[in-house]
Image: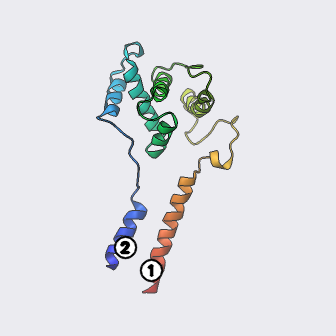
Amino acid sequence: MNKFFLMFLTFVIFFPVTAFAHTEGGLFSEAENIIEEQTPCDQLTTEQLDHLGDYYMEQIHPGGEHEIMDVMMGGDGSDNLVRMHSIMAQRFYCNDDQKGALEGSILPKVIGGMMRSINLRAENKNIPATVQPQNIKQSFWQSQISVQTLFGWILVLGGIGAVWMYTKKK
């Protein structure tokens, strides 16, 4: 019983639990094939642009974050989500600036700010991924430390403390 408990606790603490984004029949592999073959942008369909944008979004915001953002954009199959994925594909794959594509909504302001730091890193390869542009003022909650990261560390440290207390009692 004690060995089982320790093995289970070790598994829970040290095994990274990740949420896998939907691949829906290999859409990500289709996007990877398009990237590998370097298919010209003018030959891509809207559906292929949607798959590419979905792939890029998964790379930037893996797992659960991607799923939450998809729901915020209207959910799977919505026109808004397809349009957003297409815009991301055009920005990242086609190097096209899609200013005004979603005019009249708050999305350009939100997405523009989110993508701006990525575009700055793409333009200047010397900027590490953890360094944010100097002109963006960040509060604590917008910094690299997220609530999920803090909660994860609390769980890890609490688990280590529990194992230590458990072994100390013996």
Q: Residues within 10 Å of mark 2 (few under 14, many from 20)?
A: some
Give the SS element for disc 1.
helix
Q: Are marks 2 and 1 in contact (CB under 8 Å)?
A: yes
Q: Quadrant of residue 36?
A: top left
Which of these two is toward me, 64 or 106? 106
Residue lying farthest top?
A: 42
Q: CA distance from mark 2 to mark 1?
A: 10 Å
Q: Residues within 10 Å of mark 1 (few under 14, many from 20)?
A: few
Which of these two is toward me, 141 or 128? 141
Which residue type carries mark 1? Answer: Tyr
Q: Quadrant of residue 50?
A: top left
Residue 166 is tagged as: 1
Q: Position of residue 52 (x, y in %)?
A: 40, 27
Left or right: 158 in relation to 24? right
Q: Quadrant of residue 41?
A: top left
Q: Position of residue 15 (x, y in %)?
A: 39, 59
Give the SS element for disc 2.
helix
Q: Position of residue 104 (x, y in %)?
A: 62, 23
Please tell me how many numbered marks the rendered image carries. Answer: 2
Residue lying farthest left?
A: 25
Q: Residue at x 31, y 79 (%)?
A: 1
Where is 107 relative to 60, above or below? above
Q: Residue at x 30, y 34 (%)?
A: 26
Q: Residue at x 42, y 87 (%)?
A: 170
Which of these two is toward me, 147 or 170? 147
Q: Position of residue 149 (x, y in %)?
A: 54, 54
Which residue type carries mark 2? Answer: Leu
Q: How is the image coloured?
A: rainbow
Residue 39 is tagged as: none
Labels 2 and 1: the sequence-earlier one: 2
Q: Which residue is mark 2?
A: 6
Where is 16 relative to 43, above or below? below
